[in-house]
Amino acid sequence: MAIDLAALAKFDTPTICNTIELFKVRPRTAGYMDGRVRACFPEMAPAVGYAATATMRCAQPRQEGDVYGSLDEQVARFGELPGPPMVVFQDLDDPAVAATFGEIMCTTYRAFGAAGLITSGAARDLDQVRRLGFPAFSNGAICSHGYSHIVDLHRPVRVGGLTIHAGDLVHADANGVATIPLEIAGEVADAAAEFVAAEAIALDYLKSGRVEVAGFAAARGGMMESLATLSRRLRRIA
């Protein structure tokens, strides 16, 4: 089944995580980054793309080339991915000593079709990157890029406690970052719409202004029944 990234981007990342749980393809504690990685611009809409992984160092000088010398190779390899890239950096310096990205890098990535950037390290040029409308996720901000240089491309990285491989499908918003298993990705958007409709059974009752315990129990029961039915269908259980 084709994967509709625009449809996936209509849902927030918690809804995507909740929907994935219904498929029971991974533990509920797997597939998302921890609180060390946060949205630089929480007001931006969800971003969805295929991981273009890289590692970065800032503490020591690169042996050759300039500070931005690896960008051309990195964007050239965007073509290896099945759709728009989500740049995912692991900062090999721990703790981070300088910023992973800034205006030049994000402008480059945006021009070459990237959906956003995620790093275990730090950000800078936040006002400029916000004006680009480019979603970015980091563990904080540091004003200098130090000896910033890319070490490796399209290798597995570890960011926010989550291992990411090149080509993994990533969904990110103000709530955090998660991966969507490729084997179910074509079904997740439609299932998410059904998940939202099931939740609305309880939410609409609570917003009605005429609530009582028995009525809430019935509404919550209807929601849970709808979710159980959806999960059985997604798991191909009769």
Image: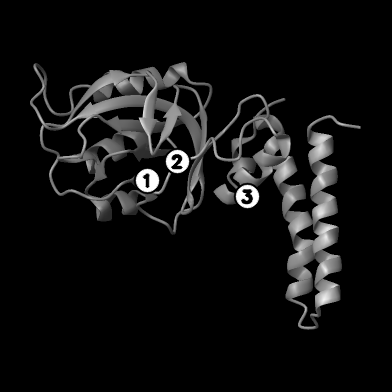
Q: Nearer the viewer, residue 60 or 189?
A: 60
**Way the structure is coloured:** one colour
Q: Quadrant of residue 107?
A: top left
Mark 1 and mark 3: Cα distance apart in space: 19 Å
Residue 208 vs 114, above or below: the answer is below
Q: Amino acid at mark 3?
A: Thr
Q: Nearer the viewer, residue 218 or 182?
A: 218
Q: Which circle's residue, 2 or 3, is located before the other in the chain?
A: 3
Question: Residue 138 location, x and y as percent?
Answer: 32, 45
**Residue name at image x 21 percent, y 35 percent:** 94
Q: In this figure, which residue is indicated by the disc labeled 1? A: 37
Query: As drawn, which residue projects farthest toward the right?
Result: 238
Identify the element where label 2 is drawn. Answer: loop
Q: Tell me: 7 left or right of 78.
A: right
Q: In this figure, which residue is indicated by the disc labeled 3? A: 15
**Residue name at image x 53 percent, y 21 percent:** 82
Mark 2 Cα shell of 10 Å, populated few (<14), some (14-19), many (≥20): many
Identify the element where label 1 is drawn. Answer: loop
Q: Amino acid at mark 1?
A: Val
Q: In this figure, which residue is indicated by the disc labeled 2? A: 33
Q: Which circle's residue, 1 or 3, is located before the other in the chain?
A: 3
Mark 1 and mark 2: Cα distance apart in space: 7 Å
Give the label, 2 or 3, closer to the camera: 2
Identify the element where label 3 is drawn. Answer: helix
Mark 1 Cα shell of 10 Å, populated few (<14), some (14-19), many (≥20): many
**Residue name at image x 48 percent, y 53 percent:** 175
Is disc 1 in contact with disc 2, using a CB cutoff of under 8 Å? yes
Question: Residue 165 location, x and y as percent?
Answer: 45, 22
Mark 3 Cα shell of 10 Å, populated few (<14), some (14-19), many (≥20): some
Mark 2 and mark 3: Cα distance apart in space: 15 Å
Question: Residue 213 location, x and y as percent?
Answer: 80, 76
**Residue name at image x 12 percent, y 44 percent:** 144
